[in-house]
Every structure is written in structure tokens, then in C-alpha cells.
Image (cartoon, rainbow, N blue to C red):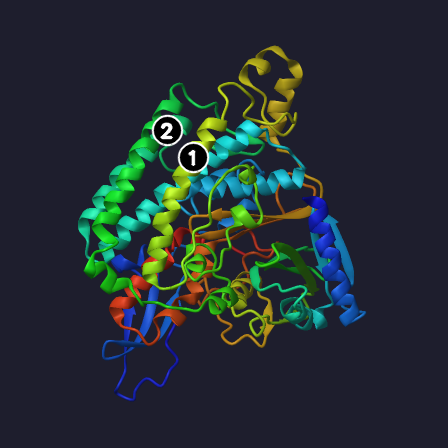
Amino acid sequence: MTQLANADASVVVEHLRSWNAGAVAQVVEYRGETTIVVPRALLRAAAQRCKEDPALNFDLLSDATCVDRFPLEPRFELNYELVSIPRRARVRLRTSVSLQHPVIDSLVPVWPGANWMEREIFDLFGIQFEGHPDLRRILLPEEFEGAPLRRDFPTEGKR
Amino acid sequence: MTTVETAIGTAKTMVLNMGPQHPSTHGVLRVLLELDGENVMKAVPDLGYLHTGIEKSCEDKTYSQAITLTDRMDYLNPLGNNLVYCMAVEKLLGLEVPKRAQYIRVMMVELQRISSHLVWLGTHALDMGAMSVMLYCFREREEILKIFERFAGQRMMTSYIRIGGVALQPPAGWREQVKRFLDMMPARVDEYEALLTENRIWQGRLKGVGYLPPDVLTACSTTGPGLRASGVAYDVRKSFPYSSYEEFDFNVQTRTESDCYARYLVRVAEIRESIKIVRQAVDKITDEGPIKSEAPGIIPPEREKMKTEMEALIYHFKIFTEGFSPAPGEAYVAVESPRGELGCFIASDGSPKPLRVHFRSPSFVNLQALPKMVEGQLIADTVACIGTIDIVLGEVDR
């Protein structure tokens, strides 16, 4: 099982590299999962490629989430879980943004399903998604101040 | 407060606030509807009334403490939530789970799937005006909850699935109890179908309502029965088998109509498939055998050992005071919950508490398709659409 996943991921890496030599900054393998680290500027184009290349065919964006690596910089790590239903394959795209410039291209033009996932990240981490059609808070009330899932936001008590 | 930013004021449309305390929104969902007569022009869901910050709370608990929080997200599928969380931690640790425990897990989550679909069927029929189905469904669900109570001591928030296995050995006489339920259930499903499937009112309310083509559903990241009713055979149990599902014989149920009626048929068919899986699991689970993996320092030692071995006592103390620390890294695990792909992403920084826990909850993602489903339809159809998406607000808001 593990080998299969890796073999498939190497196909994805090759396709992305042949499309743009700078598209793959790093490949992380851990516990049978493959993470392809993509430069911030190329995220949407790489995602588009993953979806539309018939050999890759990642038609479902299963999940998008953020990890706050505070106090490291760039501290926000965005993870996108891609699924190809016909090929039964999974891969994760990752990119990082910093606190000074927490802006990233939205993936809504590629997968409309990214809409609420990105709104959730915007709501709880305060990351801006450029090109998002409707970037509003989704879980918290609109008058709420701060981004509660950041590591420097306390779990209890006032900020 | 969310407002409908539209061309309101042309005196033709009105804005109706549906929820958050509307009985057919199954909890506290608020939907703003812009109406032209009885036609829905625009629908804007407003969430967050049940947001409790479970993901943030997980960061302040050790890995084993967080299990009890997962029960409370999707309260119709607590065992599935336990399973996905524990599997993600096990993946981080590189822990193997004994086969017997895997089969017990499969049996429990499939029973949970039946009970969740029963609640869905009962409440959805109630929304559509058929009261008696709800009473029958809850009668059978009670039998499943009795099984859970005997296994775990709890009817609903069981926390039965633990890191490395399950909490307790199956109780005496469990096999007969589960088999009795399995023997009774197929005839009961026939009864529900006799009440609904050919019922003219039921068909009138559901057929052709809430249609969305498969490519739109996939693009919206919809999973579960909603996607399968459109003909896309995506089921995590088949596509990415986990917990020994590859050893079980079952079919992925699909339809092609992609309307509310097709979603109903898929769920009823899934109840029958789950009965098949539980029956196989009952045969696979041996009478004797381990229910937890062997991993000192991660799995709490047995009571007996604690009283006779010093190491066991030390491990017990360490596990419950500081916990255990997986190596730095990330893991994402997905399971098929009754509502679709339920995922858990955990990032570890090498400390006893997770750096980040994220749940990909199917209800939250599936609800995105609601505006597309209802726009252009009638208010009454909105109720049918919300019902057949099958949302659990505890999981939407987390």
C-alpha cells in the first residue's frame, strides 16, 4: 500500500516538474503520505495542473487546513488534500505564508469547494485569500476580534 | 449578522429568515432566503451557532484526552469520530492495531452507520409530514444503542475506540445480542420501504427535487450518499480501505438521478449493506484475543499488571500525567462516515500535546452545495434539500 502511494506521488512530482521546473520546492514523505511543497506564487497554477492534467486528474479537493508554526517564520503552513476519484490516489500540496504578508491565492477558481474551507481558515487564522468571491467569517460572529486558532491566542481567558 | 447583499427593495422579493431555531434545520442552522413569492431566488447559509472550538481545545489536551472531545462533534456518529482521530494518532506513532480490534471497530462503526441513517430517515420523514416512520426508526435505533451501552457503558458518547485498539473486551453474550438485531433488521427495513418508497406523497416531495449534476457535486467537494446518488462511486471504504475493510464483501451503492429521492434510496441501500458487513464482522471476531496493541508507554497497562509489575505502574503514571510524544510530522486519515469523507489531520511537534488537530467534517463541506440545490426551487423543497444533505450541526460548527 505504502509503495503504491509513493509510486503515484512520484508521477505527480514528475508531471509538475516537467510543467514548470520550479513548481516543486520539496517533497516530504512521512508515514506513507506524500507532501509536495509548492512555492507560494505557483500554488494556484500547480493546483490547476493537478486537476486538469489527464494523467493526474485530481478532481476532488478533500480538505484545506492551516498549521501555525509559531514562532518560526514563515509561520503559516497551508495544506491541501487532493483526491483523484477515478485513479484512487491522494496527494497533499503545501505552501507557507508569513505573518507580515498572510496572503495566498484562493483555489475557488479551481475547485469551488474550496470556498468554505478557505473562509474557515480566514476566520480562524486570519489569512487572506486573493480572488475569493466571498471572504467573510464563517464560524465566528462578525464582530469577533483576533484569529483564535493562532498559537499565540490563549485557549482560556482574555487576550 | 449576515445579510443578503442583493437587489432587495425592488418590492418584488422578500427576505425570510429560516432558523436558527427552525425544526427542519436539524439543529441551529440559519438560512437566509430571498423569495419571489414561494420561489427561492437566493439562499445564504449562516453557521457558527454551535461553534465550540473543539480544534483549539484539542491543542491543550494530551493525545488520549482529546478522544472524548471527538465524540461530541458528530453526535450521530461518535464512534466514527473516535475511529478517525485514533487512526490519525496511530499513523503518527506508526502503531499497528491487532486484527481482532480492527474487526470490532468495523462492527461498531457499521452499527453506528445504521443508527445514523435511521435517525436521518425518521427525521426526514417527519419533515416531509410522515410521523410514524420516525417512531419505527427510533425503536430500532434503541436496539443499537443498547448494544453500545453493553460494549462501552454509554449509549451515545461512547469513547469506545481508543488509541491502539478499543477500550474494553466485548461483554458476555454480545454475539447473540448483535445477531438478534441483525436477524430482525432486514424485515424492518422492508417495513420502512413499504411505508415510503412507493408512497405517492413521498415521491412527489422528493423526486426531481434538489438535482445537481455529478461534476458540480465533485467540484463542490461533496462526498458521501449525496455524491453517490449522482453516480460517482466514491466511498472511502472501497477507494482507500482502512481498518481491514478490504477483507469485507460489500457493494458501493449508487444511483444516477441525483435528486432527493435518489439520496433516500442510497441511504436505505446502505443500511442493508451495513447489515451485511456487521454479519461478516461478527463471524470474524474471535472469542479470545487482544483488543489493544502492545506499546508500553502509549497503551495504558492492564490493571492486574499494574499491581504486580513496577514498570507497568510507572508507565501508567507517565501516560496519565504527561502523555506520550509522537515524533514530529503530520498525518491525515480519512474514513467514510454516514455523511461522507470524515478526515482528521494532526500535526505533531514532538511534544505530548498536538500542534494542530483539524477535522474535515463532511457536513460542513456538503452544506456548501445547498444554495446551488435550492435556488430556483420552492421553500418546501428547501426543507427536503436540507434534510437529504443530512447535516449534523455539531459537526458543521465543531
Closer to the camera, A103 or B216? B216
Is B89 displayed left or right of B161 in the figure? right
In this orientation, does residue B69 appear? no
Residue A135 picture location, percent across and down: 51, 72
Name the residue located 23 percent from the left edge and 47 percent from the top edge.
B134
> Of callouts 2 and 1, which one flags the residue occurring earlier in the amino acid sequence?
2
Quote the CA–CA distance across marks 2 and 1.
Answer: 9 Å
Is A138 displayed left or right of B325 in the figure? left
SS under mark 1: helix
Residue B88 picture location, percent across and down: 59, 43
Name the residue located 75 percent from the left edge and 61 percent from the top edge.
A13
How crowded is the residue under tag 1: few (<14 C-alpha within 10 Å), some, or many (20+)?
Answer: many
Closer to the camera, B277 or A17? B277
- Label 2: chain letter: B
Closer to the camera, A38 or A17? A17
Q: Quadrant of residue B297?
A: top right
Q: Which mark is residue A63?
A: none
Which residue sits furthest right?
A21
Residue B69 picture location, percent across and down: 47, 42
Callout 2–callout 1 Cβ contact below 8 Å: yes
Q: Amino acid at mark 1?
A: Val
How crowded is the residue under tag 2: few (<14 C-alpha within 10 Å), some, or many (20+)?
Answer: many
The residue carrying mark 2 is B178
Residue B239 picture location, percent across and down: 56, 50
Is B203 displayed left or right of A137 in the figure? left
Q: Which mark is residue B278?
A: 1
Q: Amino acid at mark 2?
A: Val
